[in-house]
């Protein structure tokens, strides 16, 4: 007779076992790794509730969860905030369902408004789970040579990259999370979005080491104009936090940067370029479509606990329109000062 399944909270001594399971599970993603527990807890202050399923002392399933609690933005359990992917990974569906049931029980104990699971693959959606995602991700197989990588990009976007290559841009892949953050902070301010705490980039580098790298592009005078912080995992590269100054638009330096990242990633042995999630019909969505990458729907689900309706924190929500316009007018220094107090709930 098989030993009963045990579900318990993760402890620090379990980190290695947890990561070994994520690394070997087919659906284990970079965002399931235990390092995110320390990153999100230390930088944003959210309480982790990582659930570990065991049978006969063997890990058979994991579910990373964080509790977000805000008067303005509500009270939720999310797997995983600030991440594209999350949810349960398990040996089989029966264990998955038990971990999801444990999350529901925890959500009721904590009296949250809702629970959100950021599944990358479609899962059953029996009550109380309902589908709640308006995002897709874009992925592309990296060809063997630089010429083949370029020829695999859509013709119009290929022309943009060739234009950028004539602008005397230079790049550097030495780790510089602080400079990369400055470029990112200016970019998101210009989009009307509160920026994250500046400690985030340093913490990501400290936690994930060589799996976290930055790439910075400079103009002909040496001024930094674009930067991206990327993750490497399971033969994939995930450009995650990217942005640029206003000059980047005319220089096409963001396009130059992502193409250069493809070349660097291939040199490192990556086979897949994961361009991350974008809200359907957003500017980022249309930008990524121009690259000709494969569009894949995401399959997020929520379960309402105390809330009567699903959350709506999208920037397309009309009630945030005036806030976005006002934020775009803030001085950069002020936006970096007060942004982290808001962005910690917008992951």
Image (cartoon, grey):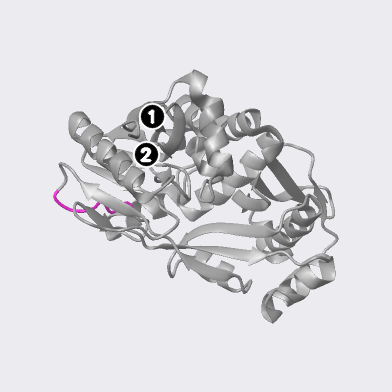
**Where in the figure is residue 132, as x and y percent of width and height?**
30, 58
Quadrant (top left/top right/bottom left/bottom right) for the N terminus: top left
Residue drawn at point x = 35 percent, y = 47 percent: 117
Q: Which residue is mark 2?
A: 345
Give the quarter of the figure containing the C terminus. Answer: top left
**Residue 213: x, y in percent?**
70, 41
Residue that badge 1 annotates:
46
Would residue 172 be counted in the magenta stretch? no
Q: Image quadrant of residue 333?
A: top right
In the rendered image of this protein, does residue 41 appear above or below residue 245? above
Residue 272 placement: quadrant: bottom right
Q: Is residue 267 above or below residue 100?
A: below
Residue depicted at 35% across the width and 41% down the height: 78
Say whether residue 166 is visible.
no
Return the x and y of residue 2 as percentages of the image width and height. 35, 34
Choose between 243 and 5: the one closer to the eye: 5
Report helix, strand or loop for mark 1.
loop
Which mark sits nearer the N-terminus, 2 or 1? 1
Give the residue at x 68% y 58%.
247
Q: Is residue 104 left or right of residue 170?
A: left
- Residue 248 appears at what percent x and percent y? 68, 58
């Amino acid at each position: 007779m098989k030993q009963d399944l045990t579900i318990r909270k993760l402890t620090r001594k379990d980190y290695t076992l947890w990561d070994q399971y994520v690394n070997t599970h087919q659906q284990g993603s970079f965002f399931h790794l235990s390092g995110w527990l320390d990153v999100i807890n230390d930088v944003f202050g959210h309480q982790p509730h990582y659930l570990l399923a065991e049978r006969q002392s063997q890990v058979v399933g994991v579910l990373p969860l964080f509790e977000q609690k805000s008067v303005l933005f509500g009270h939720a359990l999310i797997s995983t905030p600030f991440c594209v992917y999350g949810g349960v990974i398990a040996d089989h569906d029966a264990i998955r369902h038990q971990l999801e049931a444990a999350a529901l029980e925890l959500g009721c104990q904590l009296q949250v408004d809702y629970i959100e699971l950021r599944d990358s693959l479609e899962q059953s959606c029996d009550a109380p789970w309902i589908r709640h995602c308006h995002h897709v991700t874009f992925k592309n197989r990296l060809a063997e040579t630089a010429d083949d990588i370029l020829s695999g990009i859509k013709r119009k976007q290929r022309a943009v990259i060739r234009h950028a290559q004539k602008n005397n841009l230079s790049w550097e892949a030495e780790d510089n999370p602080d400079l990369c953050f400055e470029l990112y902070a200016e970019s998101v301010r210009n989009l009307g979005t509160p920026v994250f705490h500046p400690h985030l980039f340093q913490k990501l580098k400290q936690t994930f080491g060589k799996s976290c790298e930055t790439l910075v592009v400079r103009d002909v005078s040496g001024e930094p104009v674009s930067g991206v912080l990327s993750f490497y995992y399971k033969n994939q590269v995930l450009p995650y936090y990217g942005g640029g100054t206003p000059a980047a638009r005319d220089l096409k330096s963001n396009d130059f940067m992502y193409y250069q990242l493809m070349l660097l990633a291939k040199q490192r042995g990556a086979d897949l370029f994961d361009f991350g999630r974008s809200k359907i019909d957003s500017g980022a969505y249309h930008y990524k479509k121009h690259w000709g990458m494969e569009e894949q729907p995401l399959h997020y689900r929520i379960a309402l606990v105390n809330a009567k309706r699903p959350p709506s924190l999208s920037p397309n929500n009309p009630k945030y329109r005036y806030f976005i316009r006002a934020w775009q007018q803030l001085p950069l220094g002020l936006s970096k000062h007060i942004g982290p107090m808001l962005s910690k709930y917008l992951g």
